[in-house]
Structure formats: structure tokens, C-alpha cells
Image (tube, rainbow, N blue to C red):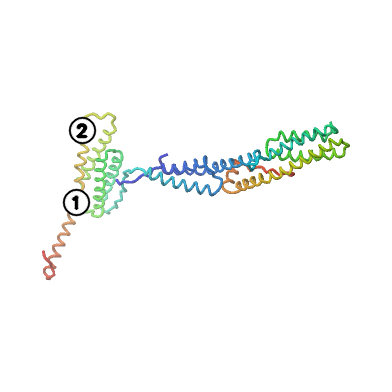
Amino acid sequence: MNNRKTALIITFIMVISSIPLGAGRSLNRIKKSIEESFYTGTETDGMSLNGDLNSKIDYANNLATVAENSLSGDNTLINLYICIDALKNADSISDKNKANDDLTDCVDALYNKLMEKDISDRDLKNTESLYAGLKSRNNTIAYEAKAYNSNVVDFNAKLSGFPGVLAKTLGLVKPAELFEEGKH
Amino acid sequence: MIEKTEKSVIPIYSIGVTWLLWAVLLPMYSLLWLLLAGAVSVAVYFITSKIFPGEKILVPSEINIEKSGDSLADSIIEKGKSFIQELNSLNAEIESIDITKNISDITEASHNIFDFISKNPKNARQINTFIDYYYPTLIKLLNTYVELCAQDAKGDNIKTTLGKIEHTVEEVVPVFHKQLDNLFEDKALDISTDISVMKSILKSEGLGGAE
């Protein structure tokens, strides 16, 4: 340890190993903050992608309740319940992304089916209102996703340059997931 | 023996520690951060170099004496090299600064003596006594000194003997310088003869100045 040559070798190893470790640690920190913004929002307006998805689940549940009056036991309604559960139980961002796309399809299918049915005026009014609310949620989600995805693209670009690429190659950090509607 | 500064390894390790601390506490995801970490570690290296400059140590000087071509002189030179090496080894084992300095003086004078012999092999006989008596006796004394120093409990006998050896080594230093000076006696005589002759010629030709 007191030998200069040994000291140089040990120091070289310390410096070389600190680069991927440090890069991995600081990149994971950035990634965590981006992923947290999925749940807390990219701005301080209290809006977030996850909040919008939860709101969409509420609308879809209400729509299912209305649909029970005329489509009880129908496959389209059962599918909607499955889609709602899938989005509720999705853990990762990519799972939420896929479940959200599926829910949009299930809602559209149920809405079309309800429009074909002879439903009461009250149900029709509620269905139109809830469907409009769901569409509005989709717009908000698209807006929120734009800001979130911009941060993800910036982060993933860091993994292509040095030293990010080193940390990525060593498996110390993984790319962040985009939230792209309609891609699944 | 020559004095050398053995640099501390702490400044080298400080570079590695700086990088590790940076990796744990500060961002390191771009080249800019890496350059900054590099610059800071260099600054830390220079600061720790000032705080821990290293220690001064005595190392044996290189024994670089060429052969003369004369068999007697060369055999004396070989013996001399071996004595110098042995003195250097013993000196490295001794901690007392005073005796270490005296041994260094002796090895330096010895180096000059054997260097003179290599250039003036006809003077080899002049240092026979040195080779046959002074060096072996000095090495014997120093071996005893090292042996006594290694004793954990130093009684009166050991302390007295150590003191005597230190005193003897101190006394023997001028002898080596004197021996070196004696070797130049012939040269001094030649030069003084040349000077006398030159002065006589200058005087006979009316060119000489004041006596």
C-alpha cells in the first residue's frame, strides 16, 4: 500500500470503477425523478398522468354502471370491467400505457354498442356526458404525456453518450419508458 | 549515501478517494461532470502533496568506479567496492543520525579514494593498510553496533560499547580524508616542481614578476 506503483494501480482501479458507478447512480436518480413525475406531474399544477388515468378509470366505472341498465352480462361490458381492472392493477409505466390503450378501445366498443341499443333518455344523456368526459381525459393525458415523454427522450439520449453508455452496457441503468398513446 | 525525498502515496490515493466520493455524492452523467471531477481531483492531489510532502531518506550512492587495467589496482578496487557496499548496507540499518552521517562521509571519501586508484593505478600500494586493516575493522565494529542496537534491553555495557563505537567512527572519518589527501601528494610535488621551473625560466628571460 505504501509503494507508489501499488498506489497508482489501486487509484487507477478506483477512478475507472467510479465512472460507471457514479454515472449509474446519478442517471438512476434522474430516471427516478422522471418516473416520479408520472405520478406527481411535470409541472406544479397538480395534474399528472397517473391522476388522469385514475380519473379515466372513474369515468369508465360510471359508464359501466350506466351500461348495466341495458347491457348487463354483455361481453362488451365484461371486457370494459376487465380493462378497468387491468389499468387499476398495472404497476409499470409500460403496463399502464398498454392498459390505457385497451381501456380506450373497450370504452369505444361499449359506447358504440350503447348507441345501437334503444336506451332511455336519461341513460343516453349520462352516456354522452361520460363519454365526452373520457374523451376530455384522453386529451389531458396526451398533453401530460408530451411533457413527460420529452423528459424521457432527453434522459435516454444521455444513455447514448459517455459515460451513460458505459453504465447502460454494464446494466447499471436502463432506459426510461415512454408513454405513447395508441402504440400498443 | 545520498539524501532523497520519498514522496508520500497519500496524494495518489486522494485522487481515487475524490473520484469515489464524487461518484457517491455528486452527478457524473456527462463528460462535463467527468472533466470537473478530474479537475477537482488534480487540485486535491496538489493540496495533499503540500500537506504530505513525503520524507527524506538516505539511499546508497551508486558505486561507479572504472577498472584501471592494472591487476593489483583492479583487485583493490573490487575489494573497495565490496567494502563500500557493505558500509552502505550497515548504514541503512542504523538509525542514529550522527553515526549515519559519519559513515556517509567515509563511503564518500572511499569512493573518491578508489576512483583515484582507478585513474592512478601506480598508487594502489599506498592504500594496502587501508584495505587490509581499516575497512575490515570498521565493518566489524559496525556489525557489532547494529547487533547491539537490536537488543531490546540496553544495559550499561551495551550503552558504553555503543558510545565507544560511535566515538571511534567519528575519529576515523578524518583518517579517510587524510588518506585521500595523501594520494594527491605526488601530484602536488609534480605541480610545485613545474611551478619552480616555470618561475626560473620567466626570470632568466626577464619576464618574471615579483617573487
Q: Residue at x 27, y 38 (%)?
A: B96
- Residue annotated with mark 2: B160
Above or below, comparing residue A94 to residue B36 in the picture: above
Query: Can residue B72 be seen at all in this image of the molecule?
Result: no
Chain hosting mark 2: B
Where residue B85 sits: x, y (%)?
30, 44
Q: Amino acid at mark 1?
A: Asp
Q: Which label belongs to residue A148?
A: none
Q: Describe the element under mark 2 as helix, strand or loop.
A: helix
Where residue A84 sits: x, y (%)?
75, 35
- Residue annotated with mark 1: B181
Of the image marks 2 and 1, the number of the one nearer the N terminus: 2
Above or below, comparing residue A42 to residue B150 in the picture: below
In the picture, measured across the screen, residue B144 lies left or right of residue A19, that is: left
**Which residue is more in the foreground, A173 or A54?**
A54
Q: Which quadrant holds the C terminus of chain A?
A: top right
Q: Amino acid at mark 2?
A: Thr
Where residue A90 sits: x, y (%)?
70, 35
Mark 1, residues whose alpha carbon is within 10 Å: few (<14), some, or many (≥20)? few
Query: Can residue B65 be seen at all in this image of the molecule?
Result: yes
Q: Describe the element under mark 1 as helix, strand or loop.
A: helix
How much space separates mark 2 and mark 1, taking CA atoms? Answer: 33 Å
Q: Which quadrant holds the N terminus of chain A?
A: top left
